[in-house]
Image: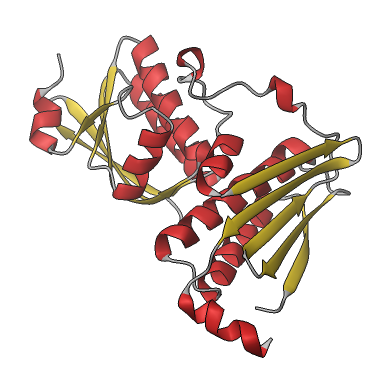
Amino acid sequence: MEQSVSYTFDSTLDTVDHAEEQATRIATELGFSDEEVMQISMAVREGAVNAVLHGNAYAPDKKVMLAFERTADGLVITIRDQGRGIDLGSIPNPLAPENLLKTSGRGIFLMRSFMDEVEIRPSQTGTEVKLIKHGRGSSAAGKEGSQ
Amino acid sequence: MSMKLSTRQVDGVTIVDCSGRITLGEGSVMMRDTVRDLLAKGNKKIVLNLGEVNYIDSSGIGELVSAYTTTKNQGGELKLLHLTKKVHDLLQITKLYTVFDVKDDEAAAVKGFK
C-alpha cells in the first residue's frame, strides 16, 4: 500500500462490500494479524453502512469517501458521507438491558469495540468517522524504510 | 459468498441450515423472510443452525434478534445451534449470548423444546 489511498463510492449496498474488501486487502498487506484484519474490516463495513444508509440515505447524488492512511503508528481510516450529520447524544447504549433486543443501533458500538480509537465528527455537511488501529505486523514494519 | 438457507424437519422442529454471510441486504432479508414464512405456516419450533455462517455484521445480528423476538411474540421458540467463533464472539460482546438459547448439539436442541 502507498502512504495513503482514497476512494469515492456511490451510496449503494455494493459500496459497503467494496469498502470491506479494500479494508481486508490493505490491513492484510500491512501485516495485521487475521484477528485484527477481521476487526478492521468489520469496523469499516459498519462505518460504510452508516454512511450509505443513515448518512446519505442511498441518495444517488451523494458520495461516500473512504481513505486509508498508513502512519508510523498504524492505520488510520476515514469514512465521510454527505448526509445531515448524526446526533451522537441520541444514540442509545446497545448494551443497556432495555436496548438488548433492539434490531439496530450496534454499528458504532462494534466500531469502538474493534478499533483502538474512533472519532466521529458530525456536521451539517456530513459525518466524518476516523477509525484508528495501532501497531502493525512484521511485514509492514519491514517495508516502512523503503517507502 | 452470499447466504444460503435450507430447512428440514426433525421431530416436529424446523432446522434452518444457514451458510455464508448474514449481512445488510440479501442475507438479512432471506433470514427474515424464511422465519416469517415458517411462523405463518405454523412452524413455531425453530433452530437456526449457524455452523456454516462465516460472517455476520450488525445488521445480521439485528436479524437474529428480530427472528428471536418475532418467534417469541407468536408463541414460538427459537434456538441457535453451532455458533462459529466469530458469531460466538460477536454475541458475547453485544451481550446477546445469554439472551439466545444457544446449543452445540442438534439432538439436544431438538429435545430442548417444550
Residue B32 picture location, percent across and down: 46, 31
Give me the residue at 57% from left, 59% from top.
Answer: A134
**What colour scheme was applied to this rendering of the protein?**
secondary structure
Give the x, y percent position of residue A83: 84, 39
Instruction: Decide which of B68, B35 is in the foreground and name it.
Output: B68
Instruction: Check the picture and name the quadrant holding the N terminus of chain B.
Output: bottom left
- Give the percent coordinates (x, y) of residue A14: 65, 56
Residue under the image location 48 percent in, 72 percent down: A137
Q: x, y percentage for residue B28?
A: 49, 39
Q: Residue at x 43, y 66 (%)?
A: A33
Q: Residue at x 45, y 35 (%)?
A: B61
**Image-based side of A68 in relation to A93, left or right:** right
Left or right: residue B70 compared with residue B106: right
Closest to the observer, B112 or B92: B92
- On the question of residue B67 being in view, the answer is yes
Asked where in the image residue B24 lies, by quadrant, the reply is: top right
Is residue A62 placed above or below B81 in the rendered structure? below
Please indicate, yes or no, whether residue B11 appears anywhere in the rendered image.
no
The correct choice, above or below, for B72 with respect to A86 in the image is above
